[in-house]
Amino acid sequence: MRTERQFAALEATDESLARVREQELSETIDPLIDAYDDIVGDRDRFIWHWLAYLFPSVRLSCVDVDRERAVHDAKLLASIFIVVADDVAERHGDRATFDELAAIPFDHRRSHPDRPAVDGAVVRYLQDVWERFSTIYDAGPRSAEFADLLAFDLKQALRAIEYSYLANQSPDLVSEHELWQHDVHNMLILVCADIDFANARSFDSTELSKLREVCDRGQRMARIGNWISTWKRELAEGDCSAGVVVHALEADIISDKQVRRIRRTPTDEAVSPVVEAISESGVEDYFLERWQTEYEEASRLESEIESVDIGAYLEGYETVLQYHIASEGKK
């Protein structure tokens, strides 16, 4: 059974989408999106406006007011980096380019855009994106304090992408269990929290472990919203690795034969019966119930954290879920 909160979250309106499309991008971000369209062009611009609109909903309340714009831009820059990396690995199956761009955020590694079989234009584009990110991040009043944690969480996000690449190369690998272990990290919620910490003089670092537990649950909530709103589009592209599809396969709602057919040739004839079977099965309700469980477990930590308004932070995930559903198939 869906809860009252879940029913509210599923109310999508044209007005919701209009607000997203009207969201302005900053002078820092807009030229990079123009360059993205020229160099990469895998995604509609809607996704960047969607992220820009929703980041304030899940910004930690402890962020310094005078750093809010910088925090917003840094999160968008990190998102551009991860979205491009994800598409290079998943959509294009380009391991050579992924390996080079995955080195960019880390001082101990070097990327080589001119190596054979590497899409140098994409790597150079992300080098520019990351240089701009680093400039903003390093200006944060507590950037040095959280730099190692940021690097750790970025590695987890890139590992999530690598897992998705391996899952697409070896379909028998993927399981719902491992999706929860790995795939959730490319939602970047922990990376976004690190950016907030670096720009929050009032954050009490003794609360870090509890707050990361809240953010970890938020990351799963964000992943659920993303799975529910993108699985149909991904199936049409031949990508069967979304949690909704994997759960349906493991529950015998769809067959391995059907999944293999979609991976081979994702025609309407192959995809439509699978979409129908999953839509009628209650799998989406299963994930929404999991979303509710994560929300409730995170709420239990509210009394243990004083330097951040956890209630407001979690309410932001209700907004994010609503906009995931409203934007189904558009990002």
Image (cartoon, rainbow, N blue to C red):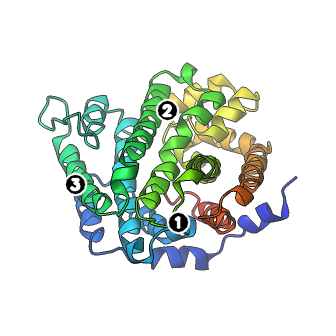
Q: Determine the secondary structure under disc 1.
A: loop
Q: Residue at x 30, y 67 (%)?
A: 29
Q: Which residue is mark 3?
A: 131
Which of these two is toward me, 146 or 94? 146
Q: Which residue is mark 1?
A: 59
Which of these two is toward me, 78 or 61? 61
- Tell me if mark 2 has few (under 14), some (14-19) or many (20+) residues whose alpha carbon lies within 10 angstroms of its own: some
Q: Is residue 39 visible?
A: no
Which of these two is toward me, 290 or 42? 290
Q: Please tell me the numbered disc located at residue 279.
A: none
Which of these two is toward me, 241 or 266? 241
- Tell me if mark 1 has few (under 14), some (14-19) or many (20+) residues whose alpha carbon lies within 10 angstroms of its own: many
| Lower position in the chain sequence, tag 3 or tag 1 | 1
| Lower position in the chain sequence, tag 2 or tag 1 | 1
Mark 2 and mark 3: Cα distance apart in space: 39 Å
Mark 3 and mark 1: Cα distance apart in space: 23 Å
| Residue 95 point in image, percent of width and height | 31, 29
Quarter location, residue 295: bottom right
The answer to whether residue 129 is above or below residue 153 is below
Is 276 on the left-hand or right-hand side of 21? right
- Tell me if mark 3 has few (under 14), some (14-19) or many (20+) residues whose alpha carbon lies within 10 angstroms of its own: some
| Residue 193 point in image, percent of width and height | 49, 55
The answer to whether residue 126 is above or below residue 168 is below
Please name the amino acid that badge 1 sits on.
Answer: Arg
Q: Please tell me the numbered disc located at residue 265.
A: 2
Q: Residue at x 65, y 75 (%)?
A: 13
| Lower position in the chain sequence, tag 2 or tag 3 | 3
Residue ranking furthest to the right: 1
Q: Is residue 7 visible?
A: yes
